[in-house]
Every structure is written in structure tokens, then in C-alpha cells.
Amino acid sequence: MDETRSHARSPVVSPGYLAVLLYGWLVSLCVFSGAALADEADRRRVEISLSIFPRIVAVDEQFRQKLDLRGRVDILLVYDADEVGARQLATRLEQQNRSLGGVELVARVGRVGEGLVADTGVPSAVFVAERLTGTQLARLMRDAERERRMVFSPFPGDVERGVTVGLSVTNRVKPYFNMAALARAEVKINPLLLKMSKRYE
């Protein structure tokens, strides 16, 4: 079957509806213990983010204009040293999200600094799979903003360092948006979700 035709018949889900579903799901999350070790805290943040991130991608108001050349949601997981770990996260992301908004989701990995473009085109969005240096993160953000793509990092402090979106973890888990990074990348997030999220101005 022609993939373009199959994609055209996929059901369209309202970004506003997705935003409400995402918020309802977020408020049900429990926060991990403050006594946890740093690496355990990072692991928990990554686990939570694997569920949150695709839902945030789906409320990008231009999400359907950012599919790959085969009409799929293409997620790039960026790593520095741990390729095996990044591939494991990519596999889990695909297993947990066979489709997004009725569109097939695929995940691939790439080492930081290698660029965003693959044979299938520019990724729909980028996930930071491990902690990066300030220089690495700045280069990644320059590339992503040039291509008008969202970058999500589960690691604390990265939103303040320029990443488009991450997590705010207090007694609730909320998306945490860098408003200047959104503007630079011209990424338009559903206003309802932005209202319910934490924002870094």
C-alpha cells in the first residue's frame, strides 16, 4: 500500500485534546524520593520523559509538517558516549509509541556533533539521551533551531542552558519550556499546554 495514501487516511487528533490528555496524565505522576542518588534521579527523569516527550511532540502545532520523507514521526536520540544506552531508549520509545496522532513513529540515534539530517530527512524532534557539555548542547541547539525543531532534555538545568523543553519536578511533574528557544526555533506549542506548563522566560 502506498505510504502517502495510508498516512492521509490517518485520523487527525486535535492538539487541544492531546494537551488536555497530557496534562491529566502528568498530574497523576508521583515524584521520586529526594533522597535518591543523582544517577537514580536521572534514570527516573529519563523514564518519565520517555512517556511525556512524544505527547509534547504531538502538540507542536506544526507537527504534521515535520514528518520524515516517508511520512513518519522521526525521533532522533542524541548521545555522547553511551550508544548502547541510547539505542535501548530508542527501542523503548518505539515499543511504547507505535504511532503518534495516527502516524507511525520511528526512533534513531546519533552522536552529538554529527548533525541532524539523515537519509530520511530532518528529524521531527530531538531527545537528549545523556548529559552533554555546554559546548555540545549549544551546538545541538544551533542546529535544531536552524531546522526549526524541538529539543527535549530530561536533565535538570538544560532548559536554563537553552534546550527547548524539559521537566519541572516538584510535587507535580510538568513540561518546562524555554520560551526564547521556542521563539528562535519558531516552534508553536498548543497554548493550552503552555498555560499549564512551567515556563523559563
Image: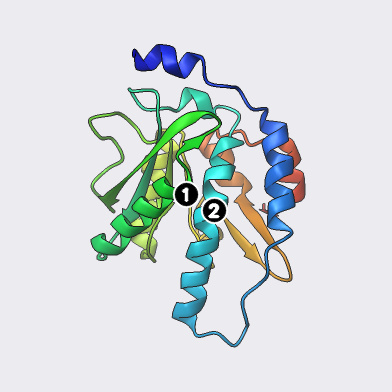
Seen at 54% across and 40% down, the residue is 57
Residue 63 location (% of width, % of height)? 53, 29
Mark 1 lies on a secondary structure that is: helix
Residue 104 location (% of width, % of height)? 43, 32
What's under tag 1, amino acid-wise? Gln
Mark 2 lies on a secondary structure that is: helix
Mark 1 or 2, nearer chain start:
2
Mark number, residue 96 = 1
Seen at 48% across and 35% down, the residue is 99
Estimate how packed mark 2 is, as few (under 14), some (14 to 19) or many (20 or more) residues with alpha carbons within 10 Å.
Answer: some
Measured in 3D between alpha carbons, the distance from the residue under mark 1 to the one under mark 2, in whole angstroms, is 8 Å
Asked if marks 1 and 2 touch (Cβ < 8 Å), the reply is: yes
Seen at 39% across and 63% down, the residue is 134
Is 167 on the left or on the right of 115, as rendered? right
Quarter of the image for the N terminus: give it. Answer: top left
| Residue 133 to residue 5: above or below | below
Q: Nearer the viewer, mark 1 or mark 2?
A: 1
Residue at image mark 2: 51
What's under tag 2, amino acid-wise? Ser
